[in-house]
Amino acid sequence: MTFEERIIQLRDQLHQYNHAYYNEDKSLVSDFEFDQLLKELQALEKAHPTLQDPSSPTQRVGGSVTKNFPTLLHAERMYSLDNTYSPEELGEWIKRIEKIYGAPIEDFTCELKFDGASINMTYVNGTLQKAVTRGDGTQGDEVTANVKTIKNVPLKLQGDYPAEFDIRGEIILPLEGFKQLNEKRLAAGEEAYRNPRNTASGSLKLQDSAETAQRPLQCFFYALAGELPYATHWESLTKARSWGFTIPKSMQPVSSLDEMLAYIQHWGEQREQLPFEIDGIVIKVNDISVQSQLGFTAKSPRWAISYKFKAEQVSTRLNSVSYQVGRTGAITPVANLEPVQLSGTIVKRASLHNADQIEKLNLRIGDSVYVEKGGEIIPKIMGFDPAKRGALENVIHYITHCPDCQAPLERIPGEAQHYCVNDTQCPPQLIGKIQHFVSRKAMDIDGIGAETIALLFQQGLIYNIADLYRLEKEQLLPLERMAEKSVDNLLAGVAASKQQPFAKVLFGLGIRHVGETVAKRLAAHFGSMLALLQARQEELLAVEDIGEKIVESLNTYFINPDNQRMIQDLTDFGLSMEVEVVEKASSKLDGKTIVVSGVFEKVSRNELKKMIEDNGGKVGSSISSKTSFVVAGASMGPAKKDKANKLNIPLISEDDFLKML
Ligand code: AMP
Ligand code: ZN
């Protein structure tokens, strides 16, 4: 047997053992034997580097180092789920979607809602190509090398899998593994991790994949994404299980609200016995064609919902209240609590939101307060225990001056928040504005984190966002934690940000009430900073979604000479102050609505969609009488074919479509 043959044999064998162990609950060899074979393979691969294979079982050992995780777009957006908290709400959801669908729906699945980090994995020809975190839903971080170390993630599939598909799952850290990890950390004098969920997502972002490999992570898969030839969610996951994915056996088909409630009741009681954390149940419409008719809201699918278990409540002592200043000057009061364990987390602080909320809760320092964790991460104070009250003189007096710059606070009539209006000098506001500017949704500047910005500010190197573009290597090198490499990264990131589109620049300025969507609207409508600066009140108000509050905030911002100067500086540094006009490739598809379906050979689906748009066409999401034609790839679903035939809509092959252009 040649080395090459032996390597292939070992890989096949190890894949086989792994599959049997994780998908069929069968140990075909002892751990010891498995390790021996793996070591042999490692040694052979090391000796024959030309025979490397990105799907080799040795990938699980890790060892590659990733400094910066690249940001990648998801082919299909990763949505969140709407929440319900009571049987009534769940019943209302069913009624709501039946109304939209226009007929009773009696085919659902119930699944556990795993509390970990979501991940999207792409498989091509049966091997794992990439794994990307959910991120903001549209794009996330590529963490493939780390995900490959997770033992139950198949690196090579078996059976009749589609040539290319995405699959989604939740990466979790089981409670036992979390406990052991913390014991080790404490023994080494390090701080304990707070909860399994954050630790799981943190583990995906470790630079050294060998370290990730040490953590007993697992991935539970819960959905395939994209167009695939399966009629139901159940069918698609059953298929996925046969290819080697861990699809939890707890998934169950149900047909009525009563059956859903029985499932919820059962797992509500069993959840304490589970070796990992769940935070609810997910209910999904099973039939994929019904799913696509229900579609999505801006945030979540209409065809799925989560049922959150009742929040756990504990009581603890309110020690003090402190006040934080945000980047817009908004003051957030924060309750400092006697640390207490709550749903697997140690809680030390809770937001009190604003002065009204404090008044409503009628708290005193020293009170024993009830703390609850609902759907959101930040725990809430629900009330106090009248039997254990703090002293009367300990009423909470809301501050009147900024805790950081001592300027008097103001409250805009009609708004709940107090503001420090000293926005040109108050340090946390200045730092916060720069942090916002570099953040991912704004200018997305790599190589400069929140702490670095605080440091540069304290060192007097930056005061506003324009100063970022004045930074020089010699100024940065002497700073603590600033190796030459990090300095180069930082400067390269800053320089690269000049390519960001105008909408991002506008959002990055951090003008109060000008969020991402508003910035996009304004950029698209006015086309340039100059036009926006010159726009009159009525013109601004005429733009969709732009109300008085926003217009007033824009005025206040643009009238300020410091801001004017800064915008001028940014313009001089070469940032985009205009919407870039994209040249259309042609108008060959003007007026046509085209649906793309199936898997393609020469170009990806996303490329196809872009080609349609570049040539003047519109991409349709589902086949209807308005569809001009369908570009049909391999494994286009039979239901879709029928529909196209019924409506007499032509199907065009990939090749013919490419010839058209
Ligand atoms: P949320 O983040 O609360 O909006 O809930 C959506 C997230 O729940 C998804 O992004 C998944 O990461 C996670 N999740 C956990 N288990 C499931 C499941 N069985 N089906 C769908 N999503 C799930
Ligand atoms: Zn201040």
Image: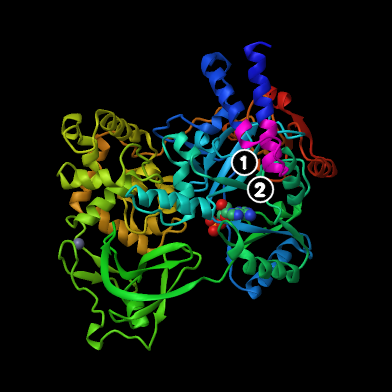
Task: Give the vertical position of 421 relative to 518 (above or below).
Answer: below
* Colour scheme of the picture: rainbow
Q: Neighbour class for label 1 at 10 Å: few (<14), some, many (≥20)?
A: many
Nearest the eye: 228 or 505: 228
Which of the two discs, 1 and 2, labels the residue nearer the N terminus?
Answer: 1
Residue 608: tell me if it is visible.
Answer: no
By secondary structure, the bulk of the magenta-drawn segment is best described as helix
Q: Nearer the viewer, residue 232 or 154?
A: 154
Residue 169 has which mark?
none
Q: Is residue 511 placed above or below 471 in the rendered structure?
A: below
Disc 1 or disc 2, which is closer to the eye?
Answer: 1
Foreground pick, 46 / 55: 46
For image coordinates 52% across by 54% down, the residue present is 176
Position of residue 106 relative to residue 368, above or below, is: above
The quarter of the rendered structure image containing the N terminus is top right
Q: Residue at x 37, y 33 (%)?
A: 499
Question: Helix, strand, or loop for circle 1?
Answer: loop
Magenta stretch: includes residue 303: no
Q: Which quadrant, please, contains the C terminus?
A: top right
- Residue 159 in sight here: yes
Task: Give percent across and percent down for residue 638.
Answer: 82, 41
State which image quarter holds ligand 2. bottom left
The location of residue 414, given as percent across then percent down, is 34, 74
Q: Which portion, as a residue range, is magenta?
A: 15-33
Task: Give the labeled residue for mark 1.
Answer: 152
Q: Is mark 2 within 8 Å of ligand 1?
A: yes
Q: Amino acid at mark 2?
A: Ala
* Percent of width and height locating residue 39: 56, 26
Question: Residue at position x 70%, y 70% from top?
Answer: 261
Left or right of residue 152: residue 403:
left
User: According to the image, label 2 marks what residue?
Assistant: 223
